[in-house]
Amino acid sequence: MRAGVVVAAQPGVEELAVQAEGLGLHSFWVNDTPMVHGDPFVALSLCAKATSRIRLGIGVTSPALRSAPAAASGLASLNALAPGRIVCGVGTGNTARRTLGMRPTSAARLEEFTGALQDLCAGRSTEYREGDRVRDIRFLHAGAHVNTADPIEFAVAALLGPKAAAVAGRRGTGLISFGLLDPTAWHALHAARHHAAQGTPRASGSHTDSYVVTSLHVLDEGQDPHGEAARDATGHLVLSLLAFAADTAADTPAAVGQLRPEEREAVRRLLERRGTTATAPDRHTKLYPGYLGRIAPQDRDLVLPSLMNMLALVGTRDDLLARISILERAGVDELLIQPVIDPPAEMAVLAQLLT
């Protein structure tokens, strides 16, 4: 299986990209969460100039954040800096929207946005709508300004639902998912994508690779899989799920209902600890600070073993290789880790394991 890394946009990110490339990793991704992290287009511009081989990804952008012309301009500009190395994840904007206190957009809007990006980034015209006004648009200046000749890869963000996978099938894109380590769920996503793709002409130069974002922690024999070191390495994923559950408990109670009693109790404690409630209109300002960053020691008790096992890869080298092999057989092409403790060291561990 291929290996890659996902990081937050911040000064010095290009140094991590150089290290990732030197380690032989396949891709280097930057989050697009405007109110939490820096700008991914700025960060990847630096990475493009500092590297020569590694693929550079945005994971993920959304029509709820950027218009298709603006996003396409950013992508094609990156493609001019790193020809043929750009990957763009697209989604409904679940996290990025919720950090604004807003709900994500629809699958229909996601599909329209994805198609427009594919067209524009390939140098084709596309339909652009604002209210009742519809116009065909295209890049009016190419060449040195933007690169529409080398293909840009797209991947649709999907969790357990088939709607996003169907968008990927109709648009001929790959899939990317966060913390989805269940091979049965991956089989279902691939089946939904395949079914939707039947009889649908795919975009020229399309890719259909599947990516999973997780964290990785290698144990020595006999080491506690749920000890402090393991909780610190995986806690950012667990806290992100608990924050999402706390944020959506009022408007999507079914999501919280799927959690175990002790997990629902962790959601309650998180709300209490952050000084907010599931219905407070400003809860997003209390739940998401430090999102996907290193957790505080006092929050280790919220990193439950059941959620660690669900979202992250923790185990001995042999344990991890066995789990990764199962994911690979389920159609996952690339494992992306999101390191927070010591990114260079964690990238090196990933490289030793998979490259």
Image (cartoon, rainbow, N blue to C red):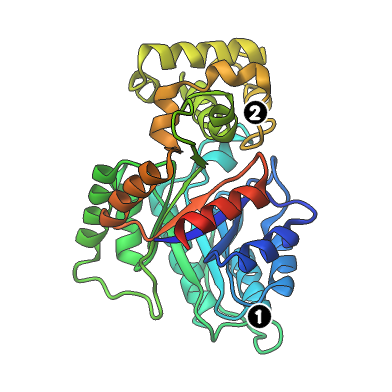
Question: Could you say where residue 83 lies in the image, as x and y percent from the top left?
Answer: 60, 81
Q: Quadrant of residue 52?
A: bottom right
The residue positioned 64% from the left and 30% from the top of the image is 288
Question: Could you say where residue 57 lies in the image, as x and y percent from the top left?
Answer: 57, 62
Residue at the outermost bottom position: 143
Circle 2 or circle 1, nearest the eye: 2
**Residue 319, above or below 283:** below
| Residue 113 visible in this rendered orientation of the protein | yes
Q: Which residue is mark 1?
A: 80
Circle 2 residues within 10 Å: few <14, some 14–19, many ≥20: many
**Residue 352, above or below 319:** below
Type of amino acid at the residue the image marks with label 2: Ile
Which quarter shows the N terminus? bottom left
Type of amino acid at the residue the image marks with label 1: Ala
Question: Could you say where residue 297 lies in the image, as x and y percent from the top left?
Answer: 67, 21
Q: Which residue is mark 2?
A: 295
| Residue 31 visible in this rendered orientation of the protein | no
